[in-house]
C-alpha cells in the first residue's frame, strides 16, 4: 500500500537493481502505461557493463512492436529509461543476435513477448531468427512454449470463438528451422490473434494425467540418439501410463538431405544439439510440460566453433538415455507438484490473470518458484494486484512419505513449508479489467 | 356431449349445472347430422384432409424463418452487471433531479425528503441520502443548470427525474441533457411535469399532457414513466402526487451502463480541507490536501489508482479509508415489515441537516445550532472511554430535538461536556482483564516515561496532521470489528502510540528479538521455530511486562492449545506474508518516501488474520511488531533475500541454491518410491482419492480397502462398480443392485430422449441455442457469485486489500496538491465527482473518433477550431482535425464537418477506451440561444501518431521541351527535394502523364528533367499530386470549472478564430491567391500546317497535298458540248418533269404543315392559360387556409400564455 501511495505521486517504475527481470519490467511498463527507469545495469561488471546485446535486441523488438515508445540509454548502457507507447502488432521479423558469450535463445524473446501479443492493434505475426534449441536449462524452447503457454492462452480466450473478429486462428508457435545453441540459425514463427479482453480464469481441477506426448529433437547428430532418448523416457513413464508417445525429430546437417525433406523443417543450424520435450495432458485439459537438453559444456573453449562440429558423444556429454530419464523425471516432478500450469509458466499465468476483467480468477499452482515470487511482488507494484495465496489443504494427504525429497526441496528455490511441500497453492485475484485499448473499433 | 348431471345420494359434493347441448339452429342441425352419420357409420373424422397441411410452401417457409429470426432477435446476453447483487450492499442509487431553472427541482426534492423522512429541508444542496425502505436508500441530487454540471450529472445518475414545466413546454436544456445522457450511457429516465395547475381549461390541460407525453416518449421510449405535479402547498407538491412517485422509486430497476461497469467513482457527499493551518497561514494559495467523502460506486476503487476529480484535474489518491456507513440500511433483524418514519435516516451534510458529523479523525459539531444543557452522571454504554466509539453506528440523525437516546449525537455531546480530563489520561488508568483468572493489564504500566499526553477535546477544531494517523487506527479498527467480527477489543494502547516518539525503544526491542529468533533457528526444528516466532511477537508487544506475560500464559493450558492451533493456521497465512511481506519492507521499488511507514490498511490486516493478538497487549508501534514477525521466521528471511541476478531467466536457479529436483529419486524403484506416490495423479491410478465428491454415495462402503484394490494396471471404473460392497445382507445387496440398475436405466432414458430431441431438427437447434445462451448466463452468474465469495471470508481488511474498495463502501479519499482555488470557490450545489481511471487512461495521445455534427446545431464546425469534449469522466478543450476515410483507406483532411454525415475527428487528449461516447460543445459559457451541443461521436482508435493527410499539388512550368522530355522548374527548391521525388508521377493540365527523372544542374535550383507520354507545350502547367500528413496540435485544456467562483465562466478557454475576429475587430485576412478571378482565355490561333517538301515527296499520292491553282483557260472537258441522242433526251426530260412535280408537292405539304402547327400552338396556349388559372386559384386557396391555421395557433398561444 505504501508502494501504491508512492507510485501515485510519481508514476515511474524505478528500479535500482539493474537488469533483473528485464523483460517482465518492460512488459509491465507497457501494460500499465507507466514509464520505467532501470539503474545500475551491470554497473559493477568490469568486463561487460551495461545492457547486453540480447537485451538491446529485445528493446529493439519492443520498439518495432509499438508506436510512440521512447527508449533512452545512457552512454555506458547502465541506465535505461523507457516510456511506453501503443502496441501495434502486425507482421514483424526480428533477428536475435548470436554472440559468443551469453546469447539467448528465441524462447527468451518469445517468453517476453507472449503476454503482450494479444493486446496489439493487429494480430501479431512474429518471425524470429536465432537459437531455437539446446538452452532449456535457462530459457524455454519454442516447443515448450507451444505446449505450455499456448494452451493457457487459449484458456484465457485468446483466439477463442467469441471475440475472434480479427483473428480466427488460435495462437501458434511454429519452428520452421531448427538451430541449436550456440550457433543458432533457426527460425520460429509466432502468431497471436488479438482480444478485446481476456476471460476470467478458473483453473482448479487438475484431473488425472491421461496422456503424455513428447518430441525428441536432434540436430546434426546420429538419428539413433533421438530414438534412444525417446526410448528411455518412455521406459520411465510406462510404469505409470501406457499412453506415451514420443516423436523423434531428426535434423541432419547436410544440405542435400535438408533439401530432400524440405517440407519437414528444411535442415537446421550449424550446431549439434539434442533435446527432448514432454507434455502431459490431463482429463481436465491441463497441459504440463518439461523439457531438457543435452548439456553443452560451455566452459571449455566455447570460442572455437570447430568443437561443435564434432560428434556430440565424443565430448564427454550426458548419454541420450540419461537425458530421456531426466526429462521424464522432470515431467513427473511437475505432475507431483500438482499445479495446473508448470513451474516455468507460473509467472506468465499469474500475469495474465492480473489482466483479466474485474472478476475473480483462480488457479492452482505447485510450489512457487523464486522467479514467480519476485514477479508477484512486481505485479503488485506495477498493476496493483495482490494475489490471495492460500495453501490448499485438500490437494494432497501424503505428508510423511518422502522425507529425503523434502530436504532437497527445502534447499532449493521452492518456498513452502517442509511438511506440506505437496500442497498446492491456490492463487486468486481480482483482475485489473485490462482492455485492449489499442485495438480500433469499427 | 352433455354430461349427465348426477344428482344423487352424495349430497356433500357440489352439484353444478350440466351443459345443455344445442337443439335448434345450425349447431343443433349439425349435431343431429353427426348423430345420424354416426349411426349409419359414415361419419368422417376429418372433413378437410388439407386443413392442417402446408398450402403454400414458400410462404410457410418464410413464416417460419421470420418467427425464428424474431425469436433470435429477442435473445440477448445481458450486459455484465457489476452492481451488487443485493440492494443493501450497493451504494444508494443516485437520483438526479434535472431541469431548467424555475421548473421546481428543489421543490421536488423537498417534497420527497418530507415524504420519506418527515423532515423539512429548507435549502437542499449537495447529495442527500435517504433510507427509503428497509432495504433501500437513495441519494438525491439536484442538477444545476450549467452545461458542465449537466455533463457531470449525466455521467453519474442512475435515475433521472426530468422536470419539465408543462405550462411552458420542453426547453432546450432538457433536450441537451437527454443528448448528454445518450452519449454517456442512458440511465433510467422518468419525466416529472410540473405547473399543471396553471392551465385554465381542462381541455387545454389534457391536450398539452398528451402532446408532452408523446414528445417525451419519442425522446426516450414509448411508455416511459412520467408524473404530473399540479399544485404546490407550503413549498411542496401535493402529498398524493409525490406518494405516487415514491411508490415507483421503490420499485425501479436501474440499468447497468458500460462505463460505470468498468470504472469506479465516488460522488462526493462532502469534503474537508485538512491542510495544516500553519501552512495556509504561510501561503494562502498553497496546495491543499483535501479529504473527500462518499460512497464508492461502479467497480472497485483500488489503492494507488489515479483519479480524475471532475472539474479540477487528475490526482493520485494519497490515502483512502473505509468509514462506517453514515446512512446504513435498516437493521434486518427487526421484525417490522416497513420502515418507521422515526427510523428513517437522512444524510445530507451540505444541506445543514444535523449538527454532528463524523470523520475518520475528527468529530465536527455545529455548535451554532446545538444547544444542550449539562447533565450529570451520564455514563457511556461501553466500558471503553474512546470518545469516538459510541457514535460509530450512528449517522447524523435528522431531528435531534427532544427524543434522543444515549447513542444519539445529543447524548454524545452531553457526555463530551462532562469530560474532566483528557482521554489519554483516562486511558492511563484503564485496565483490561483478558481471562477470568488472569491478571489485569494496565495501560499505564507500559512505558509511561515515553508518553506524551496530549489533551484532546473532540470539537470542531481541526487537528494537526500527525494525529490523523492515530485516530485513523482507532476508527479503522472499529470498522474492522464490524466487518470481520474480529476479537481484538483492546484498543488501549493505540491512542498513545506516537510512532516518532516510541520508535527508539521499539527498535531496540526488535533487535533483541531478531537475535533470539535466529539463535533458535539453528537449534530447533521447524515447529519450535515457528512457535518461537509467535512468542517473539508477544515478547515484542509487552516490552517490559515480558516476564509477567510469559508466566501468565504458561499457566493457561487452554490458551496453549489455542496457540497451537493458531500456529497451524498461521503457517498457511504466512505464505501471503512471505510473498508480499509487510508493507514498507517488502518493496523492491525505490520509492521516494522510504520513510513513510504508515500503511494503514495493511497493519489492519494483520489484526484481522492473526487471531493470537487476542492474547496479548496491543503493541505500541505496529511496524516494529510486523517486521519482527517477518524476521522472526527463518523462511521469510530467505524469501526476502531473493536475488534473481541479472540473467533474467525464468528457469535458472539463482546462484547459491542447489538444483530444484533430484532425478534419482524419481528413478528409484520399489514399493515406497517417489514414483508410486503420484500414481493416483494418472488415469490409471485410484480415482477415488482425489475426487471424493463424484462418488460420494459409494464412499461409505469402501473406505477401508481403497488402497488395496488397485494394482498398478488395475481397471478402475469397472472394478469399482462390479465389486459388490461387502458386509451386506442379501436383501440389502439386492436392493442396492436394484437401485443401481434403476439409476442406470433412468440415465439411459434421459440420454436417449435427449438425443432423440436433438434429431428433430429445428427444435433441436432451438434447444441448442437456448442451452448456449443459458450456459453463458449461468457462467455469468457463477462468476458473480465467485466474485462475492472469494475474498469475503477473510474479513473486511484483507478483502479491501485484495479487491480494493468495493461499491457501497463509504470511504474517505485524501488527495494532496489540490489548488487553493478549489476550496475557496467551492459551491455546494455543484456536483463533485471523483472518477477512477484505469492506468491506460492517464496517458495522453491522439484519439480518432467517428464524429457527427448535431443536426440541431446551426453551423458546421471548422477544422482546427477548439471544441470542448466530454469523454469518460473528463471534459476538456482540444483542437480537432476532421477527416474522411477514402475508398483506399486514406484519411483525407476536411476543412469543415459535413452537414448531415459522419466524419472522423482526430484530436489530442487523454486516452479513452474505444467505443466510448464523445460529446462536443463549442462554447460552455455565454448566452447561446440555440442548441449548445455541437457534435456527438464515438472513440474509434487511439494512437501516438495520426494518419490524416492533406492533398498538396506541387506546380512547375516547363522551361525547355524536347520531344517527350522537358526540363521543368519551379516545382522544387533544391536538388535534394528532386531526388526525394525521383520516379514520382506528374501530370500536365491537359492530362499528359509523366515522371520525374533527375535534377539538372543548370538553371533554377530544383529544376529537373521529366519525361511525358507525349510532347508537352511550353504553355502547359505541370503538377505533382502529393499527400502531406496534417499536424494535429497537442492542445489539451481541462475545463477546470470548479476552480473558479463563476464556474465555467471563469475558466479560460481558447477561443475560436471567428470569435477572436469579432472581438478584436480584425478583418479576415485574405490571401490574394485564393480570390476567384474571371478567367481570361485567349483564343488560340493555330497556324496552317506546313509540310516540308522533302516529307511531302515521300508521302504516297493519296495523302499528298493537292495544290490546285486556278486555271486561266477552261479545261478541255469543260469546253466540250454534250449532245444527247433523242432517246436519251426523252428520258432526261421525263426525269426532270417528275422531279419538278415532286418538288412542287413537297413545298405544298410544308406549307400545310406549318399552318397546322400554328393552329395547334394556339390551341395549347389557350388550354394552358385555363390550367394556369386553376392552379393559381388552388394555390391561393391553400395559402389562405394555412394562414388561417397559423393565425389560430398564434391566437391560441397568445391566449394560453
Image (cartoon, rainbow, N blue to C red):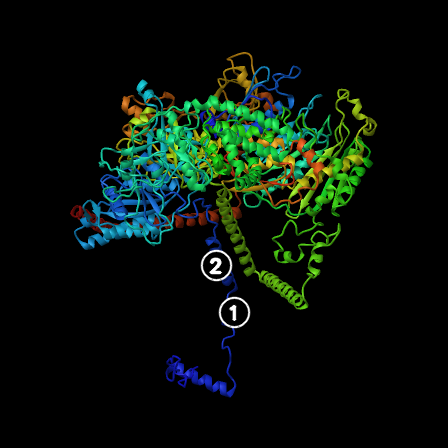
In which quadrant will I find the N terminus of chain B? bottom left
Q: Which residue is mark 2?
A: B67
The crowding category of the residue bearing disc 2, from other C-alpha atoms within 10 Å (few below 14, some 14 to 19, many at least 20), is few
The one nearer the camera, B1073 or B785, is B785
On the image, the x and y values in percent for residue B870 come to 38, 34
Q: Of the residues tagged 2 and 1, which is closer to the observer?
A: 2
Question: Is residue B1132 placed above or below B614 in the rendered structure?
Answer: below
Viewer can see residue B276: yes
Q: Which residue is mark 1?
A: B53
First in sequence, mark 2 or 1: give its number.
Answer: 1
The one nearer the camera, B645 or B893, is B645
On the image, the x and y values in percent for residue B503 come to 46, 23
Question: Is residue A6 placed above or below B1174 in the rendered structure?
Answer: above
- Residue located 58% across and 62% down the image: B757
- Residue located 74% across and 47% down the image: A243
The crowding category of the residue bearing disc 1, from other C-alpha atoms within 10 Å (few below 14, some 14 to 19, many at least 20), is few
Q: Quadrant of residue A77?
A: top right
Q: Say which element carries label 2.
A: helix
The one nearer the camera, B911 or B340, is B340
Instruction: Specify the farthest residue to the right.
Output: A314
Viewer can see residue B595: no
The one nearer the camera, B289 or B941, is B289
On the image, the x and y values in percent for residue B974 come to 52, 15
Numbered badge on residue B605: none
Chain under callout 1: B
Instruction: Count the numbered circles shown.
Output: 2
* Left or right, B204 with reference to B346: left
CA gap, disc 2 and disc 1? 18 Å
* Left or right, B655 with reference to B1052: right
Q: Say which element carries label 1.
A: loop
Chain under callout 2: B
Amino acid at each position: 500500500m505504501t508502494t501504491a501511495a508512492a507510485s501515485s505521486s510519481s508514476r515511474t517504475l524505478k528500479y535500482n537493481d539493474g537488469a533483473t527481470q528485464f523483460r517482465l519490467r518492460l512488459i509491465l511498463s507497457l501494460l500499465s502505461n507507466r514509464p520505467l527507469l532501470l539503474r545500475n545495469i551491470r554497473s559493477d561488471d568490469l568486463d561487460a557493463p551495461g545492457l547486453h546485446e540480447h537485451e538491446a535486441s529485445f528493446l529493439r523488438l519492443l520498439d518495432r512492436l509499438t508506436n510512440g515508445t521512447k527508449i533512452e540509454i545512457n552512454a555506458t548502457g547502465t541506465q535505461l529509461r523507457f516510456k511506453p507507447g501503443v502496441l501495434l502488432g502486425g507482421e514483424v521479423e526480428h533477428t536475435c543476435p548470436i554472440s559468443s558469450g551469453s546469447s539467448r535463445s528465441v524462447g527468451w524473446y518469445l517468453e517476453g513477448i507472449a503476454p503482450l501479443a494479444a493486446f496489439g492493434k493487429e494480430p501479431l505475426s512474429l518471425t524470429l531468427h536465432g537459437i531455437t534449441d539446446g538452452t532449456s536449462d535457462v530459457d524455454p524452447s519454442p516447443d515448450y512454449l507451444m505446449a505450455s503457454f499456448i494452451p493457457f492462452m487459449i484458456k484465457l480466450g485468446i483466439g477463442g470463438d467469441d471475440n475472434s473478429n480479427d483473428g480466427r486462428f488460435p495462437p501458434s508457435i511454429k519452428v520452421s528451422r531448427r538451430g541449436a545453441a550456440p550457433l543458432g540459425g533457426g527460425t520460429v514463427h509466432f502468431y497471436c490473434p488479438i482480444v478485446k479482453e481476456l476471460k476470467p480464469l478458473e483453473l482448479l481441477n487438475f484431473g488425472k494425467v491421461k496422456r503424455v506426448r513428447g518430441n525428441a529433437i536432434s540436430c546434426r547428430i546420429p538419428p539413433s540418439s533421438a530414438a534412444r532418448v525417446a526410448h528411455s523416457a518412455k521406459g520411465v513413464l510406462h510404469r505409470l501410463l501406457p499412453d506415451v508417445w514420443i516423436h523423434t525429430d531428426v535434423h541432419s546437417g547436410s544440405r542435400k538431405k535438408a533439401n530432400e525433406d524440405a517440407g519437414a523443417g528444411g535442415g537446421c543450424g550449424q550446431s549439434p544439439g539434442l533435446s527432448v520435450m514432454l507434455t502431459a495432458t490431463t482429463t481436465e485439459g491441463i497441459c504440463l510440460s518439461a523439457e531438457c537438453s543435452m548439456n553443452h559444456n560451455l566452459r571449455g573453449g566455447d570460442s572455437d566453433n570447430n568443437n561443435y562440429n564434432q560428434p556430440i558423444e565424443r565430448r564427454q556429454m550426458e548419454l541420450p538415455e540419461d537425458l530421456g530419464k531426466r526429462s521424464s523425471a522432470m515431467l513427473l516432478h511437475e505432475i507431483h507438484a500438482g499445479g495446473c500450469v508448470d513451474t516455468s509458466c507460473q509467472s506468465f499465468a499469474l500475469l495474465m490473470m492480473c489482466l483479466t476483467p474485474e472478476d475473480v480468477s483462480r488457479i492452482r499452482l505447485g510450489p512457487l518458484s523464486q522467479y514467480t515470487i519476485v514477479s508477484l511482488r512486481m505485479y503488485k507494484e506495477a498493476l496493483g494486484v495482490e494475489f490471495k495465496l492460500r495453501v490448499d489443504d485438500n490437494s494432497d494427504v501424503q505428508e510423511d512419505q518422502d522425507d529425503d525429497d523434502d530436504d532437497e526441496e527445502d534447499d532449493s528455490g521452492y518456498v513452502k513449508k517442509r511438511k506440506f511441500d505437496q500442497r498446492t497453492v491456490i492463487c486468486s485475484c481480482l483482475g485489473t479489467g485490462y482492455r485492449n485499448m489499442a485495438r480500433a473499433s469499427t | 356431449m352433455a354430461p349427465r348431471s348426477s344428482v344423487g345420494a352424495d349430497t356433500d359434493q357440489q352439484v353444478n349445472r350440466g351443459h345443455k347441448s344445442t337443439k335448434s339452429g345450425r349447431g343443433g342441425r349439425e349435431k343431429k347430422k353427426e348423430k345420424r352419420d354416426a349411426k349409419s357409420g359414415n361419419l368422417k373424422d376429418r372433413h378437410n384432409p388439407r386443413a392442417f397441411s402446408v398450402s403454400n410452401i414458400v410462404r410457410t417457409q418464410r413464416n417460419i424463418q421470420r418467427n425464428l429470426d424474431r425469436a433470435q432477435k429477442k435473445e440477448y446476453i445481458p450486459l455484465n452487471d457489476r452492481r451488487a447483487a443485493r440492494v443493501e450492499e450497493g451504494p444508494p442509487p443516485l437520483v438526479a433531479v434535472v431541469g431548467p431553472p424555475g421548473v421546481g427541482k428543489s421543490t421536488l426534492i423537498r417534497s420527497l425528503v418530507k415524504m420519506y423522512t418527515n423532515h423539512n429541508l429548507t435549502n437542499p444542496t449537495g447529495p442527500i441520502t435517504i433510507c427509503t425502505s428497509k432495504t433501500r436508500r437513495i441519494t438525491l441530487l439536484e442538477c444545476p443548470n450549467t452545461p458542465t454540471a449537466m455533463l457531470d450529472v449525466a455521467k453519474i445518475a442512475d435515475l433521472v427525474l426530468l422536470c419539465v414545466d408543462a405550462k411552458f413546454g420542453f426547453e432546450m436544456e432538457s433536450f441537451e441533457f437527454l443528448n448528454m445522457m445518450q452519449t454517456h450511457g442512458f440511465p433510467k429516465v422518468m419525466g416529472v411535469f410540473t405547473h399543471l395547475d396553471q392551465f385554465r381549461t381542462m381541455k387545454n390541460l389534457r391536450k398539452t399532457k398528451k402532446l408532452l407525453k408523446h414528445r417525451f416518449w419519442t425522446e426516450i421510449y414509448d411508455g416511459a414513466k412520467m408524473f404530473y405535479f399540479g399544485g404546490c402547498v407550503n413549498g411542496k407538491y401535493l402529498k398524493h402526487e409525490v406518494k405516487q412517485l415514491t411508490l415507483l422509486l421503490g420499485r425501479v430497476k436501474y440499468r447497468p451502463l458500460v462505463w460505470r461497469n468498468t470504472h469506479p467513482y465516488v460522488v462526493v457527499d462532502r469534503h474537508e480541507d485538512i491542510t495544516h493551518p500553519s501552512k495556509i497561514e504561510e501561503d494562502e494559495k498553497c496546495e491543499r490536501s483535501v479529504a473527500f467523502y462518499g460512497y464508492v460506486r461502479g467497480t472497485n476503487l483500488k489503492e494507488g489508482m489515479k483519479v480524475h476529480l471532475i472539474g479540477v484535474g487528475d490526482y493520485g489518491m494519497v490515502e483512502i479509508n473505509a468509514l462506517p456507513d453514515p446512512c446504513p440500511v435498516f437493521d434486518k433483524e427487526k421484525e417490522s415489515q416497513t420502515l418507521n418514519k422515526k427510523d428513517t435516516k437522512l444524510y445530507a451534510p451540505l444541506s445543514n441537516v444535523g449538527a454532528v458529523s463524523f470523520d475518520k479523525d475528527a468529530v465536527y459539531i455545529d455548535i451554532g445550532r446545538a444547544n444542550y444543557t449539562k447533565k450529570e452522571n451520564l455514563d457511556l454504554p461501553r466500558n471503553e472511554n474512546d470518545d469516538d466509539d459510541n457514535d460509530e453506528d450512528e449517522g447524523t440523525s435528522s431531528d435531534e430535538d427532544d427524543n434522543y437516546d444515549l447513542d444519539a449525537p445529543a447524548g454524545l455531546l452531553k457526555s463530551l461536556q462532562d469530560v474532566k480530563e483528557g482521554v489519554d489520561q483516562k486511558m492511563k488508568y484503564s485496565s483490561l482483564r483478558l481471562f477470568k483468572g488472569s491478571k489485569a493489564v494496565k495501560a499505564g504500566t507500559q512505558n509511561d516515561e515515553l508518553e506524551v499526553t496530549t489533551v484532546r477535546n473532540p470539537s470542531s477544531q481541526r487537528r494537526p496532521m500527525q494525529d490523523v494517523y492515530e485516530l485513523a487506527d482507532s476508527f479503522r479498527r472499529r470498522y474492522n470489528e464490524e466487518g470481520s467480527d474480529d476479537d481484538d477489543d483492546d484498543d488501549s494502547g493505540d491512542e498513545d502510540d506516537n510512532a516518532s516518539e516510541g520508535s527508539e525503544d521499539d527498535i531496540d526491542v526488535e533487535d533483541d528479538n531478531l537475535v533470539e529468533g535466529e539463535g533458535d533457528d539453528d537449534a530447533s526444528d521447524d515447529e519450535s521455530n515457528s512457535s518461537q516466532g509467535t512468542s517473539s511477537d508477544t515478547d515484542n508487544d509487552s516490552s517490559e511486562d515480558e516476564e509477567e506475560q510469559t508466566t501468565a500464559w504458561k499457566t493457561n493450558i487452554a490458551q496453549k492449545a489455542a496457540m497451537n492451533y493458531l500456529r497451524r493456521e498461521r503457517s498457511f497465512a504466512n505464505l501471503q506474508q512471505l510473498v508480499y511481506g509487510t508493507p514498507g519492507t517488502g518493496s523492491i521499488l525505490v520509492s521516494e518516501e522510504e520513510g513513510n511507514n504508515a500503511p494503514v490498511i495493511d497493519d489492519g490486516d494483520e489484526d484481522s488474520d492473526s487471531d493470537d493478538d487476542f492474547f496479548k497487549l496491543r503493541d505500541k508501534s505496529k511496524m516494529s511488531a510486523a517486521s519482527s514477525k517477518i524476521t522472526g521466521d527463518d523462511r521469510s528471511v530467505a524469501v526476502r533475500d531473493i536475488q534473481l541476478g541479472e540473467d533474467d531467466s525464468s528457469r535458472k536457479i539463482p546462484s547459491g541454491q542447489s538444483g530444484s529436483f533430484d532425478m534419482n529419486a524419481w528413478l528409484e524403484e520399489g514399493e515406497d518410491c517417489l514414483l508410486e506416490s503420484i500414481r493416483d495423479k494418472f488415469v490409471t491410478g485410484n480415482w477415488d482419492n482425489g475426487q471424493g465428491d463424484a462418488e460420494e454415495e459409494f464412499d461409505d462402503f469402501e473406505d477401508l480397502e481403497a488402497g488395496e484394490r488397485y494394482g498398478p494396471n488395475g481397471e478402475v471404473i469397472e472394478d469399482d462398480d462390479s465389486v459388490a460392497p461387502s458386509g451386506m445382507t442379501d436383501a440389502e445387496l439386492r436392493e442396492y443392485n436394484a437401485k443401481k440398475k434403476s439409476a442406470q436405466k433412468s440415465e439411459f432414458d434421459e440420454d436417449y430422449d435427449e438425443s432423440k430431441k436433438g434429431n428433430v431438427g429445428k427444435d433441436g437447434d432451438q434447444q441448442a441455442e437456448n442451452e448456449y445462451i443459458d450456459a453463458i448466463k449461468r457462467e455469468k452468474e457463477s462468476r458473480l457469485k465467485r466474485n462475492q465469495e472469494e475474498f469475503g471470508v477473510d474479513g473486511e481488511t484483507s478483502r479491501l486489500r485484495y479487491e480494493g474498495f468495493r461499491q457501497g463502501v463509504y470511504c474517505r479519499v485524501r488527495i494532496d496538491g489540490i489548488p487553493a482555488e478549489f476550496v475557496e470557490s467551492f459551491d455546494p450545489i455543484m456536483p463533485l465527482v471523483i472518477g477512477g481511471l484505469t492506468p491506460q487512461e492517464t496517458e495522453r495521445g491522439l484519439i480518432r473518433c467517428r464524429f457527427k455534427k448535431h443536426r440541431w446545431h446551426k453551423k458546421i464546425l471548422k477544422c482546427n477550431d477548439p471544441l470542448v469534449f466530454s469523454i469518460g469522466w473528463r471534459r476538456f478543450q482540444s483542437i480537432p482535425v476532421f477527416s474522411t476515410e477514402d475508398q483506399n483507406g486514406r484519411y483525407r483532411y476536411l476543412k469543415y464537418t459535413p452537414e448531415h454525415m459522419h466524419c472522423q475527428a482526430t484530436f489530442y487528449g487523454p486516452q479513452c477506451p474505444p467505443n466510448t461516447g464523445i460529446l462536443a460543445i463549442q462554447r460552455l459559457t455565454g448566452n447561446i440561444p440555440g442548441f449548445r451541443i455541437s457534435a456527438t461521436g464515438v472513440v474509434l482508435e487511439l494512437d501516438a501518431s495520426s494518419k490524416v493527410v492533406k492533398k498538396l499539388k506541387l506546380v512547375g512550368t516547363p522551361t525547355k521541351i524536347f520531344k517527350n522530355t522537358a526540363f521543368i522548374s519551379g516545382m522544387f527548391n533544391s536538388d535534394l527535394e528532386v531526388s526525394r521525388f525521383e520516379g514520382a508521377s506528374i501530370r500536365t493540365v491537359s492530362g499528359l502523364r509523366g515522371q520525374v527523372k533527375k535534377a539538372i544542374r543548370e538553371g533554377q535550383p530544383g529544376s529537373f528533367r521529366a519525361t511525358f507520354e507525349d510532347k508537352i507545350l511550353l504553355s502547359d502547367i505541370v503538377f505533382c499530386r502529393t499527400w502531406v500528413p496534417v499536424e494535429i496540435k497537442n492542445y489539451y485544456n481541462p475545463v477546470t470549472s470548479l476552480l473558479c467562483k463563476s464556474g465555467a465562466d471563469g475558466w479560460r478557454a481558447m477561443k475560436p478564430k471567428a470569435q477572436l475576429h469579432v472581438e478584436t475587430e480584425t478583418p479576415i485576412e485574405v490571401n490574394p491567391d485564393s480570390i476567384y478571378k474571371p478567367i481570361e482565355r485567349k483564343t488560340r490561333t493555330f497556324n496552317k500546317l506546313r509540310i516540308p517538301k522533302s516529307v511531302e515527296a515521300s508521302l504516297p499520292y493519296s495523302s499528298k497535298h493537292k495544290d490546285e491553282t486556278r486555271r486561266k483557260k477552261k479545261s478541255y472537258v469543260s469546253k466540250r458540248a454534250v449532245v444527247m441522242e433523242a432517246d436519251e433526251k426523252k428520258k432526261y426530260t421525263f426525269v426532270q418533269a417528275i422531279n419538278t412535280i415532286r418538288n412542287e408537292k413537297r413545298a405544298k405539304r410544308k406549307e400545310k404543315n406549318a399552318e397546322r402547327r400554328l393552329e395547334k400552338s394556339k390551341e395549347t396556349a389557350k388550354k394552358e392559360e385555363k390550367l394556369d388559372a386553376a392552379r393559381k386559384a388552388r394555390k391561393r386557396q391553400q395559402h389562405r387556409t394555412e394562414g388561417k391555421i397559423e393565425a389560430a395557433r398564434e391566437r391560441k398561444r397568445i391566449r394560453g400564455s
